[in-house]
Image (cartoon, rainbow, N blue to C red):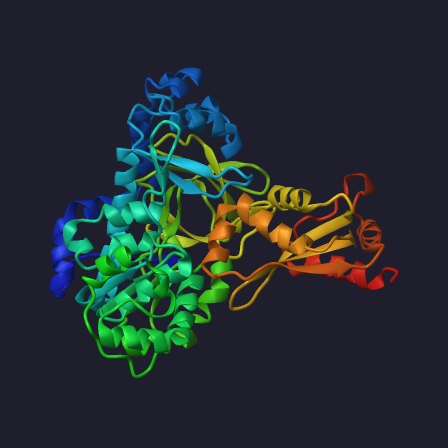
Amino acid sequence: MRYTIELHEQKSPEYRFLYALKRNLVSQFLSSMDNPRKTQQKRLQRILSLFKGSAFAKEHDLHNVRSFSDFRRSAPIQTHQELYPWLQRVAMGEANVLVKERTTALMETSGTTSVPKHIPVTRSWAKSIADAQSLWVLSMVHDIPQVARGQALTMVSPAVHGHSSGGIPIGSNTGRMHQEQPWWVQNNYPIPYEVFSLKPSIVKQYVILRFALQANISSWTTANPSMVLLMTRRLEEWKDDLQLDLRGGTLRHGPASLLSEEKRAHLEKKLIKAASPFCWKPANIWPLACVNCWKGGPAQFFVEQLPNALGGDIPIREVGITASEGYFALPLGQDWGGGVLWTMGHILEFVDESENCYFAWELEIHKRYRLIITTESGLYRYDLNDVVEVVGFCQNTPVIRFVGKYGRFLNALGEKVSEEQISMAVQQSKRLEDRIIGFTARIVWGDRPSFQVAVEGSLSIGFGERLEENLRSINLEYDSKRESGRMVKLSMLALRKGTYDRFRRLKTERGAPDGQLKDPIIALNDEEWNCIWSAHQDSDS
């Protein structure tokens, strides 16, 4: 499929203003798509110059890298675990470890073990992200000018919630980007930034809705569509309390009653009295012109529910193929099945199922690849574990869509719970009297998804509660989804005696090598789960 981009000037005064600010960037971007190889070559030289003189560059002899062939020979593809010792040195405040630029912050995201990942932020990396974000906003305003005529409801996490051992701020990328917007953009946000740090989440959610209900919301942006669904349910759930607070210009009812007097007094200074909505659906409350969120991979399940939850057929736009590690593809249209590769940012490599590695200009349509990135902040040939599919081309640059995480993860809303984390949580939850033969976890889909853990064996009272608590402590993203109400508590299923013996027999009968057969800790799809379920039903009672 061939994709086209319209980013030239139009009559909308809002768009003309933005276009004037970003005219050079637009020109460079449009030119870059004609020759992705040339564009990536420029980026390679720029990124290598940032590595020059660092401890990592010296160990891998990067000063001799001149070509893409040299680049691939310089270092193997690395997982986060393999790069972790270097990242630890950065977190401890050591300079010139990965790149020569100063690390200004660490973006926290969930790792595949109990240790969160802390991704370094540098000036050059932040500029690459900001340029991509500017083009995305420009495209949105081009296609839907009315989004610029109201306020932007943008839901983020705090930019800083702690510091590393070396004193570097640790926080979320959404909060960082939110705070780095120009003043004239920040003035258009109806939610005071300090609201995003409120705890617990039900208080934060209530206060967000209270401020939003006195505003003129034309766009709603949050990474995960499940959050939009949750907030639409909260509107209905809290409408009586919100009506009282709207009438009084206050924050005194519902979950807001949990606020401290000091915090309440501070926030109420920014409130006004407002009329209650006649209908509590977002499309009837605000002149909502666009909702921006993830649309690929597991998010598709929730995107399909948005029209009914919103109360209208509001355009849903993809926010991009992004992660805390960087920005990889730009969706520049509501109906795009993905995004065009952002070749003006990081170095992008792609590994197929045979472990062959390709660059952006070597990709084939309809093929799937695992994404490998090299960034301005020091991630060198870093395996992101994201699987993408090429769905077309824009000029000569591939357009990709996000498929899901590579490997064994439970990933309903971005929590990425690994087999290791499930195993660790089970181990931590055991008591001396527990006897576990085997266990398998899966996602149970619904308006609010959950995990189900099937166990063969005998369990003591409270095992499920302990498992939930331990899994939340091990995986910070799962804890966040549970604390916010986007996921519900995991459930337990007792498997009959002999289930895993029967499972192994079923697999060997179907040709699986007996010596390499493992009990599935995670069932990634219906086929895998149905094999366990069949073994459960056929086993002895």
Q: Is residue 505 above or below residue 107?
A: below
Left or right position of 287 against 257: left
Which residue in the rendered view is the most extreme toward the front? 261
Residue 348 seen in the current view: yes
Q: Quadrant of residue 98?
A: top left
Report the residue at 52% width, 60% height from top. 487
Q: Position of residue 447 (x, y in %)?
A: 51, 68
Residue 512 in the image: above or below residue 304: above
Residue 130 horizontal/vertical position (percent): 26, 45
In this orientation, which residue lies closer to the viewer: 482 or 381?
482
Q: Nearer the viewer, residue 506 or 342?
A: 506
Which residue occupies 42% across, 76% down? Answer: 308
Q: Is residue 444 left or right of residue 460?
A: left
Give the answer, above or below, for where 449 lies relative to 89. below
Q: Left of 497 or right of it: where is 396?
A: left
Question: Which residue ends up furthest to the bottom in the rendered image?
Answer: 278
Residue under the image location 53 percent in, 32 percent down: 81
